[in-house]
Amino acid sequence: MDDGSPGKRREPELDIDIKGVTAAIERDFKANRNGYVGHHTNRSPNPNQRIFDVKIAIPADSLFEGEVSFNVTFSVGVRISTAASVTVDATVIKAT
């Protein structure tokens, strides 16, 4: 949960980080660019509830989209792994 710094408070956001990737991908995720989405979330309209609209995506796929709620403030570690593969058929054509 991220509500800014002591001298500069803001509406609480759910702060999600990406780990085990390159520094460039971490920067893209934090900036919500190049297909990476989800570092900070939107809080629901009711300020009295800790309900957040969450969407987590990478360029290849949407990993999670839904609502997350908490009854107290705490830190949670979640590990999501994804993999991609490409299959290619090749034909060799002899030069004449």
Image (tube, rainbow, N blue to C red):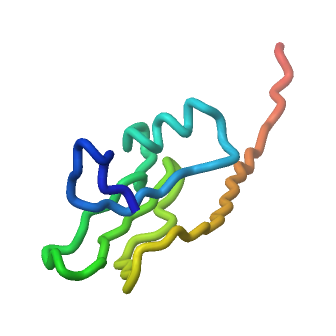
Seen at 46% across and 37% down, the residue is: 28
Viewer-proximal residue, 89 or 4? 4
Q: Where is residue 81 in the image (x, y as percent from the top left)?
A: 68, 61
Seen at 65% across and 35% down, the residue is: 22
Figure quadrant of the C terminus: top right
Q: In the picture shown, does residue 50 fall above or below 23?
A: below
Q: In the picture shown, does residue 23 fall above or below 71?
A: above
Question: How many numbered marks have been drawn onto this rendered protein structure?
Answer: 0
Viewer-proximal residue, 14 or 24? 14
Viewer-proximal residue, 69 or 61? 69
Viewer-proximal residue, 56 or 19? 19
Q: In the picture shown, does residue 36 fall above or below 78?
A: above
Relative to 93, 50 lies left or right: left
Q: Position of residue 39 (x, y in %)?
A: 42, 52
Q: In the picture shown, does residue 88 fall above or below 68?
A: above
Q: Which of the 4 image quadrants contains residue 31?
A: top left
Relative to 50, 57 lies left or right: right
Q: Where is residue 12 in the image (x, y as percent from the top left)?
A: 28, 61
Q: Which of the 4 image quadrants contains residue 80?
A: bottom right
Q: Which of the 4 image quadrants contains residue 69?
A: bottom left
